[in-house]
């Protein structure tokens, strides 16, 4: 900063994703609107406090709008199609459309009860909180830095995504530039004719950039692979496939009530096996990273706070399911369980982690250009 005040170093992007996924996992363990509202407040406060001034940091508002739309759609479906929750307090009686016998169990219209609407609100709010947590990760973590941290086994995927993220803004800029040029010349820029006359130059420019990028990547040795023994390749495939299957089974167990006992151990074993497979798979892609992101103590604490929230809410859902899943029949006001609420507040830790001190000399022009950049070091992938 120009005034010489300390600037907080950027955290490892994976730390933000672990923190956000931890909050999202906690949101899936409860339908209590007070806890879900507290999770939304925690994520919003951390995003407001910690997000950088970058283009991707503005995506949080888009996720908020998407979450609101999901909640409204969930309520509209209940009003139009009914709810499986029986209710006695009828708010409005809509005309019911008669359906044939093969559509048993489905209705259009009919009575809209307060219990059904409240159940739909709880259920929709849970999904909305999950979307907002994902939006928080998108707003806090740099996508390019996150892709740079991918293991060597996902090297080709990371390159493809980076190229796509680089070319998409260029395509949009080309479209705006060509449409502005056509308007200045008095030519149409809308409709099918305008789209064709703008689209062809855009595609031509994208093709030229693609060929130039492919030539530059080939000249720099992209796509090189090392010789790996067949036994290592088979072990890598077995570990990666088995790990992904374990992650899927463990995640399913965590998201269902009957799988709570085996979900976490299976998920942990799957993650360990997948990471081992990715580590072995990275041997076929010899490369180095320029300015690698480091796992600093602040990054570890940030990730640990999200994991702690998820773990504590999972335990609370098993120990006191009635408090985390309030009933709607009969209609009662939900109560705020104290220790699960305190566990959610652990997610505020990233907002209060103190900066480590001045990172660079403010008088240095290079420091003013990127005062939070990590040291220029290289490490093998």
Image (tube, rainbow, N blue to C red):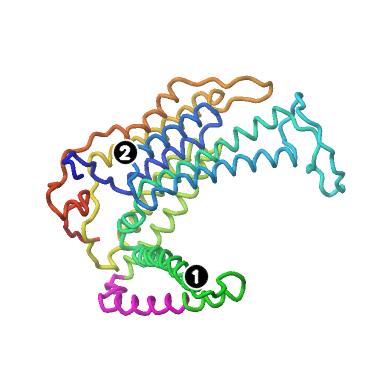
Q: Position of residue 145 (x, y in %)?
A: 31, 55
Q: Position of residue 351 (x, y in %)?
A: 32, 34
Task: Label 1: state its secondary structure.
Answer: helix
| C-alpha span from label 1 to label 2 | 45 Å
228 part of magenta stretch: yes
**Mark 1, residues whose alpha carbon is within 10 Å: few (<14), some, or many (≥20)?**
many
Residue nearest the observer in this picture, 6 or 73: 6
Residue picked out by circle 2: 302
Q: Nearer the viewer, mark 1 or mark 2?
A: 1
Residue nearest the observer in this picture, 338 or 162: 162
Identify the main secondary structure in magenta: helix
- Relative height, residue 220 to residue 169 (above, below): below
The reply to whether dot 1 and dot 2 touch (C-beta < 8 Å) is no
The tag earlier along the polypeptide, 1 or 2, is 1
Q: Quadrant of the N terminus?
A: top left
Left/right placement of residue 344 relative to residue 117 reads left
Label disc, if present, on residue 179 of the rendered structure = 1
Is residue 235 at least partly visible in the picture? no
Give the quadrant of residue 149.
bottom left
Query: What residue do we see at 19% from left, 51% from top?
Result: 368
Query: What residue do we see at 35% from left, 66% from top?
Result: 159
């Amino acid at each position: 900063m120009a005034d010489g005040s300390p600037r907080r170093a950027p955290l490892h992007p994976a730390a933000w994703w672990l923190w956000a996924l931890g909050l999202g996992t906690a949101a899936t363990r409860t339908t209590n609107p007070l806890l879900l509202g507290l999770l939304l407040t925690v994520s919003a406060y951390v995003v407001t406090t910690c997000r950088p001034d970058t283009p991707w940091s503005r995506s949080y508002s888009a996720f908020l709008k998407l979450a609101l739309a999901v909640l409204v759609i969930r309520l509209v479906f209940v009003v139009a199609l009914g709810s499986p929750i029986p209710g006695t307090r009828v708010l409005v009686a809509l005309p019911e459309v008669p359906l044939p016998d093969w559509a048993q169990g489905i209705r259009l219209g009919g009575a809209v009860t307060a219990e059904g609407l409240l159940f739909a609100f709880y259920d929709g709010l849970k999904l909305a909180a999950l979307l907002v947590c994902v939006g928080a990760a998108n707003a806090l973590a740099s996508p390019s830095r996150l892709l740079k941290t991918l293991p060597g086994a996902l090297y080709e995927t990371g390159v493809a995504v980076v190229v796509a993220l680089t070319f998409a803004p260029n395509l949009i800029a080309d479209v705006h530039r060509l449409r502005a040029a056509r308007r200045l010349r008095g030519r149409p820029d809308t409709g099918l004719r305008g789209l064709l006359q703008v689209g062809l130059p855009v595609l031509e420019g994208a093709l030229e950039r693609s060929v130039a990028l492919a030539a530059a990547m080939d000249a720099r040795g992209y796509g090189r692979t090392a010789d790996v023994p067949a036994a290592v390749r088979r072990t890598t495939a077995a570990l990666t496939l088995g790990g992904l299957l374990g992650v899927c089974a463990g995640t399913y167990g965590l998201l269902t009530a009957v799988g709570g006992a085996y979900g976490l151990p299976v998920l942990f074993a799957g993650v360990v096996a997948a990471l081992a497979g990715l580590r072995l798979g990275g041997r076929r892609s010899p490369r180095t990273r320029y300015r690698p992101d480091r796992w600093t103590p602040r990054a570890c604490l940030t990730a640990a706070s999200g994991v702690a929230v998820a773990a504590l809410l999972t335990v609370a859902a098993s120990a006191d399911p009635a408090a985390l899943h309030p009933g709607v029949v009969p209609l009662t006001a939900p109560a705020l369980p104290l220790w699960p609420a305190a566990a959610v507040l652990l997610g505020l830790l990233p907002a209060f982690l103190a900066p480590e001190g001045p990172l660079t000399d403010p008088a240095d022009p290079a420091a003013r250009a990127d005062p939070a950049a990590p040291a220029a070091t290289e490490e093998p992938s």
